[in-house]
Image: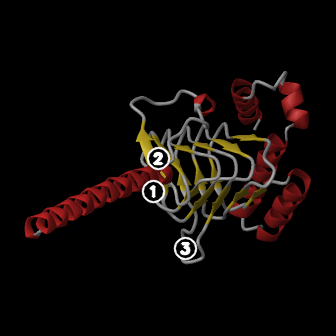
Amino acid sequence: MFRYLRETLGAYQARDPAARSKLEIFLLYPGVHATLYYRLAHFLHRHKLRFLARAVSQWARLWTGIEIHPGATIGRRLVIDHGMGIVIGETAEVGDDVLLYQGVTLGGTGKDQGKRHPTIGNNVLIGSGAKVLGPFKVGDGARIAANAVVLREVPPEATAVGVPAHVVNIAGQRVAYASDVDQIHITDPVTETMKSLLSRVEFLEEQLDRMHRQDIAAKDKELEEEL
């Protein structure tokens, strides 16, 4: 437990420029408190003490604003930045070195049985307000932009953005730390598609206008010949 705690505090220090010391992180960061409560709740859950497990997780939710179901599987060095409003479902699996921002949901669609929630690979970043819904895999090193709604598998090293989310690029190399990701300068595939459609419409309008002018010129010529 102490080794796990040292790893977690070190991960927060490495990824949060506002973190001044491990003591400050331990005492004041709700993400750390939520994951510590989760470890206890998960232990109780695995030992069939389901009521106590849920009681611990609900206390953690009340205390931190972060809800992690005791049945979820969470790897090492999870960093929850700010944390308010995060929800992680019962069958969700989260790998090592994952970074979650506030408002993230790892949930289900309500249509699946058994495995209902996503599997998040190692070293994944999920931006604030993003929703990852369904029993699919988000590959290692993937990045989910803020407010994206992810409804299908995301390949390793890919960046997904939009509603519903689309993969906009697959990086050539692994991101060492998810906090290095630029969440601002990301191409929106919906916007790019709209630009392409508008460009096509303008082209077709020009073609129609040219054909119309040619038709008028031809009729004028015929009229002149008749006269």
Q: Nearer the viewer, mark 3 or mark 1?
A: 1
Task: Give the structural element (helix, strand or loop) at label 3.
Answer: loop
Residue 145: quadrant of the picture = top right
Residue 224: quadrant of the picture = bottom left
Task: Give the structural element (helix, strand or loop) at label 2.
Answer: loop
Q: CA distance from mark 3 to mark 2?
A: 21 Å
Mark 1 lies on residue: 153
In the rendered image, residue 96, in percent from the top left (x then y), is placed at: 59, 40
Q: Are marks 3 and 2 in contact (CB under 8 Å)?
A: no
In the rendered image, residue 83, in percent from the top left (x then y), is placed at: 78, 46
Q: Is residue 122 above or below residue 37?
A: above
Q: Is residue 129 above or below residue 16?
A: below
Task: Tell me the residue at 72%/34% (across/down).
Answer: 8
User: Callout 2: 10 Å neighbours few (<14), some, many (20+)?
Assistant: many
User: Callout 3: 10 Å neighbours few (<14), some, many (20+)?
Assistant: few
Task: Tell me the residue at 34%/55% (across/down).
Answer: 200
Front-most of 61 and 158? 158
Task: Tell me the residue at 80%/40% (across/down).
Answer: 32
Q: Amino acid at mark 1?
A: Glu
Residue 186, label in figure: none
Which comes sooner in the sequence, label 3 or label 1?
3
Mark 2 lies on residue: 139
In the rendered image, residue 69, in percent from the top left (x then y), is placed at: 72, 61
Q: Amino acid at mark 3?
A: Gly
Mark 3 lies on residue: 114
